[in-house]
Amino acid sequence: MAIFSGRYSWTGIREDNSEQIAWSAGACDVTIYKWPAKGNVEPLKPYVCVYAQTGSGFSVSANPEKFAKKLCAEFSLELQRVLWVEDHGTAENRFEIVTFSRSSRLGATFFYKVEKRWASDVEAGRLVKELEMYSSL
């Protein structure tokens, strides 16, 4: 089930009390979808968010935490229950899996350790098939 597929942009101007992605404008192509449960088994990460840089404005590659938090707030997702994937659009090493692990907390705000790894061939194959399906929407 597709939740969002399109260009996600931000102005860099604080419009409410929420945390900004960056203090400069930018945009990413984003596809968010839910993996269906198989029988009575629900995946540990039932949502997938694939994002790709557009070359317009600020890049979230170096610090994806604020970008991920903003998407979670907007689409009512739990950060650690989403498989985060950066699509580099290249033939080799196209997908990079981004993992967020809670590292500390200050009041109600959580801070995360960010780790990245290249997607395996099996993961990349599945992502390509799923993205083809959702890009036709």
Image (cartoon, grey):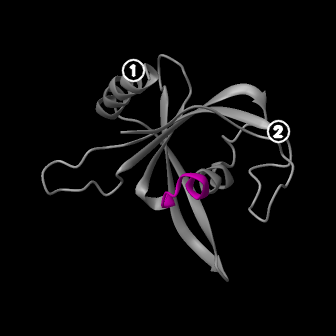
Picture mark count: 2
The residue shown at (48%, 26%) is: 93
Residue 78 in magenta?
yes
- Three-letter code, disc 1: Glu
Secondary-structure class at tag 2: loop
- Three-letter code, disc 2: Ala
Magenta stretch in the rendered image: 72-79
Residue holding disc 2: 25
Could you tell whether 29 is left or right of 26 in the image?
left
Residue holding disc 1: 132
Residue 69 in magenta?
no
Closer-to-camera residue (66/116): 66
User: Could you say where residue 54 lies in the image, as x and y percent from the top left?
Assistant: 68, 25
User: Could you say where residue 84 lies in the image, as x and y percent from the top left?
Assistant: 49, 45
The residue most toward the top is: 91
- Quadrant containing the N terminus is top left
The residue shown at (14%, 57%) is: 40
User: Could you say where residue 87 lies in the image, as x and y percent from the top left?
Assistant: 53, 30
Q: Main secondary structure of the magenta part?
A: helix
Q: Quadrant of residue 45?
A: bottom left
**Up-down: is 129 above or below 109?**
above
Q: Residues within 10 Å of mark 2 (few under 14, many from 20)?
A: some
